[in-house]
Image (spheres, rainbow, N blue to C red):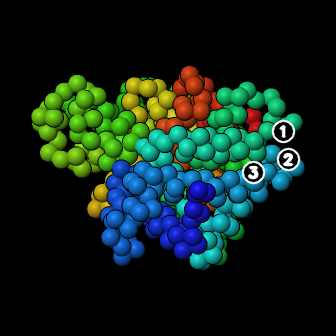
Amino acid sequence: MPERQPTRRFETRKAAIVASAVGVLNRKGVRGMTLADVAASLDLVPTAVIYYFKNKEELAQACFLKAIDRFDQLLDAGATGHSAEERVGLFLKAYFDFKRQVVTGGAEPVAVFNDVRALNQPAVNDAYVAMFRKTRALLVGPETGRWTRTELNARAHLLISEVFWTVAWIYRHDAEDFGRIAGRVIAMTIDGLAAPDAAWAPIPLPASVVEGPDAANELFLRAATELINEEGYVGASVEKISARLNVTKGAFYHHHETKDELVIACFERTFQVMRAAIREAERVGKTGYQVLTTAASALVEYQMSGNARLLRTSALTSAPEAIQPRLLGEFDRISLRFASLIGDGIADGSIRPVDANLAAQMVTGMINASAELHFWTEAMTADAAVQTYVQPFFEGLLGA
């Protein structure tokens, strides 16, 4: 007997559940989302959702696959260009137009990819890798044939990560301005921030500058940061943090009364490291451009060193909503510091006249995304990351 095909009503209800789940997933992450949350948003009982999706992992998979399908369409729009520069521009234009449609009600939102690795489902992983390869294909051409596969991967990661990062700042702008923003982001992506005659000369900072605070619980902060980056807030349980350090839960609670307290401490450690790098760069740099590239290079080297990492800003999406505003405010202040450095560079002629606020967000996004650079550039050293990832950001994605 042939298998019965789903009815239109079944597919409509299933699509509604996925659409509702996207909102919950984007607020709480994979680990924090529950079928009960999704059911409540649709005024259903949880068993009604289970009829369509047997567990939250299956539902999260549907959300991510839908998002990947949408990005595949945007990348296909970019692929129609005749040069790498044209393809990148068309992709970014298509993306910002899609975001405009979402805000104005012409398109449904899609899941953000901050927490995609926490799901670790083969179907999603394979689709995500295929999407990355499509992104990389935009950059392939006669003008970029000199790059190695590692260099190509680093730049593809930079491009797609800046697109993902827009969710952290685009909500501050009116939808009618998205076209103008797209133009500015395209220009900074293609041409970079450096003025035409600005030399690439970041100053190496002593490791002690960006090692973070010398605290008795530094090992806890490092272990928690790594787990939160990998699995999100909920996935980084007290048990997993303690197991990674081979200590008891009692030892954990000796240092921190609650997990939220530890998460806040992890973010504060990240803020301290970033501010320390900026202060030292300001002390030794001669121009706004040199200060900015010195700080950014030091922070990416820190991320790639393997000794300790900065907490990904995107980890905020799965942190408790009660602590998110305070932490987002801190990241906004870091971006304002970068905007100030960019303003200094524009004033002294070392940085092109750009939108300082947008550029600062792109700098923050580049540093944040370096936490995942090792997934696409196996065995890349910290020094190599500066040359193949940071320098193209500042001098232009298709240059150098």
Query: Which residue bears the numbered disc 2?
Result: 83
- Amino acid at pointer 1: Gly
Q: Is residue 305 above or below residue 109?
A: above
Quadrant of the image occupied by residue 216: top left
> Could you say where residue 150 lies in the image, as x and y percent from the top left?
67, 28
Q: Residue at x 31, y 41 (%)?
A: 236
Query: Which residue bears the numbered disc 3?
Result: 88
Q: Residue at x 76, y 29 (%)?
A: 147
Q: Is residue 59 above or below residue 293?
A: below
Q: Which mark is residue 141?
A: 1
Residue 115 in view here: yes
Q: Is residue 50 left or right of residue 187?
A: left
Q: Residues within 10 Å of mark 3 (few under 14, many from 20)?
A: many
> Could you say where residue 264 lies in the image, as x and y percent from the top left?
28, 48
What element does badge 3 sit on? helix
Quadrant of the image occupied by residue 399: top right
- Work out which quarter of the rendered image holds the N terminus and state it: bottom right
What element does badge 1 sit on? loop
Q: Give whichever of discs 2 and 3 has the lower sequence position.
A: 2
Q: Is residue 200 left or right of residue 62?
A: right
Q: CB atoms at circles 1 and 2 under 8 Å apart?
A: yes
